[in-house]
Amino acid sequence: MASVTEENYLKALFILVTERGMATISDLSKLLKVSLPTANSMIKNLKKQELVNYEKYKPLSLTEKGRREAALVLRKHRLTEMFLVNEMGFGWEEVHEIAEQIEHINSPIFFDRMDKLMGHPTIDPHGSPIPDKDGHIAEEVYEQLSNCRTGEKVRLIALAHSASDFLRYLNNRDLSLGVEMRIVSIEAYDGSMVVSYDNHPAETLTHPVCEKLRVEKVD
Amino acid sequence: MASVTEENYLKALFILVTERGMATISDLSKLLKVSLPTANSMIKNLKKQELVNYEKYKPLSLTEKGRREAALVLRKHRLTEMFLVNEMGFGWEEVHEIAEQIEHINSPIFFDRMDKLMGHPTIDPHGSPIPDKDGHIAEEVYEQLSNCRTGEKVRLIALAHSASDFLRYLNNRDLSLGVEMRIVSIEAYDGSMVVSYDNHPAETLTHPVCEKLRVEKVD
DNA sequence: TAATTTTGTTAGAATAATCTAACTCCATAC
DNA sequence: GTATGGAGTTAGATTATTCTAACAAAATTA
């Protein structure tokens, strides 16, 4: 079975490929904060185990076996986040670091029990889909807020990132999943948006923030 | 901070010293299933960190710092076991293996939350005391069933071991903490005892089992 | 296209945790 | 009081994961 380190590489690769369609060794080395040679040698190791496809100087991808392993780690991570929020009362900004550790626990009954206690949730507290027990994961079809137009009304449905400082930023503005907002205006210069929702008639969100907010249109 | 391996050595040492009053390198090597030289070199490492007292060829003990670290690992283990039983619905025979892994999670807020959700429990599902946040642990003052006499009435209050096969053995006989039993007879030859309780008028328990059952006398 | 920068690779070393083989110390049995 | 067996130690090697230094390939810029 994959070591904790190997699981982290597989998960990182899965996320990179899902988010940007491809991944390189230097992407991995940045995301995991290891040196390039370290990532390079781990990739050789994972190739030997037939978990990643890799040829010298070429971009990386997961084999079917690797993709499945990675999705199961992601399943454990997201189930844990949901459990921490729903069953233990944590805020969505507190759970990532804990889940980063618990995702490596090797105990199918433990995660099955979480899953059952929560009634088999399909998304985590940040709106990301939870892979099923076979490693299948729903595609994320939501739009970025940054791609929407002035006047549109949208519902916040998921987040592309879940760093705790970003989540606290959202908390401070009463932004949570399900909030419906109208795009009041878009600043052409820097792409920042002014949105209105609930008791916030005019909240300005910078472009990097809008890129991370996933929304669906409301009629 | 101590690595997972170091935490396991400290915990093992704590348990050995608590159970038998002292510990040697070979005790450790047997308990942790590592070779003698492996245990030897780890002990040197822990001595360098001032976590254990050790002189060549002498028995081992924990320093105050080491004792505290060990007790905090044990705290995480036992809180986890209690959480798994009380909040997640596991049987007491299922929780040891999971807790062995979760005890190494580094997240004070996670364990504080468990503790709070359960109302600050002081014993785990096997009756063992849970150390407090400062690493203080209550002494276990219970008697072994094997030291009791014919005719005495006792209440099962704790277990000295929590291996899952032992716990299933108890489950199969409807033995759980709190059960009150009367000692019907003791077989002098092998120390086995016949006890009666609830719907079990005459259950025979071997000496090794009786040694692991901790009881208090009922008037 | 040539120069430069970024990315990737190889070589070689370090650390943590483990092992086996060989040797030494110590308690105790005779 | 010596011999013996168990416990402890040392030496040396292995594996996993990491690093830096040096170099090579690919991509980008001029």
Image: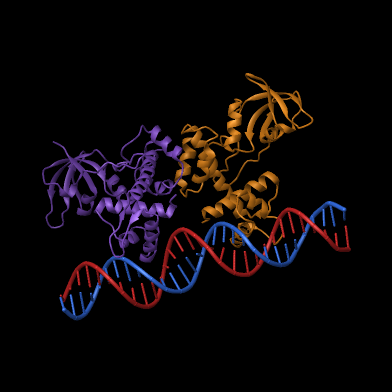
Chain colours: A purple, B orange, C blue, D red
The location of residue A14, given as percent across then percent down, is: 31, 51
Judge left or right: residue B95 versus residue B190. Answer: left
Say whether residue B217 is visible. no
Judge left or right: residue A12 versus residue B174. Answer: left
Res A95 → quadrant:
top left
Judge left or right: residue B87 versus residue B18. Answer: left
Res A6 → quadrant:
bottom left
The location of residue B131, given as percent across then percent down, is: 58, 43
Which sits in the foreground, C2 or C15? Answer: C2
Say whether residue B57 is visible. yes
Which residue appears at 31% of the width and 47% of the height? A167
The location of residue B91, given as percent across then percent down, is: 52, 32
Judge left or right: residue B196 versus residue A26. Answer: right
Which residue appears at 47% of the width and 43% of the height? B112
Which sits in the foreground, B28 or B157? Answer: B28
Which sits in the foreground, A6 or A128? Answer: A6
The location of residue B36, given as percent across then percent down, is: 64, 57
Q: Relative to A163, is B197 above or below?
A: above
Question: Which quarter of the rendering shows the C terminus of chain A?
Answer: top left
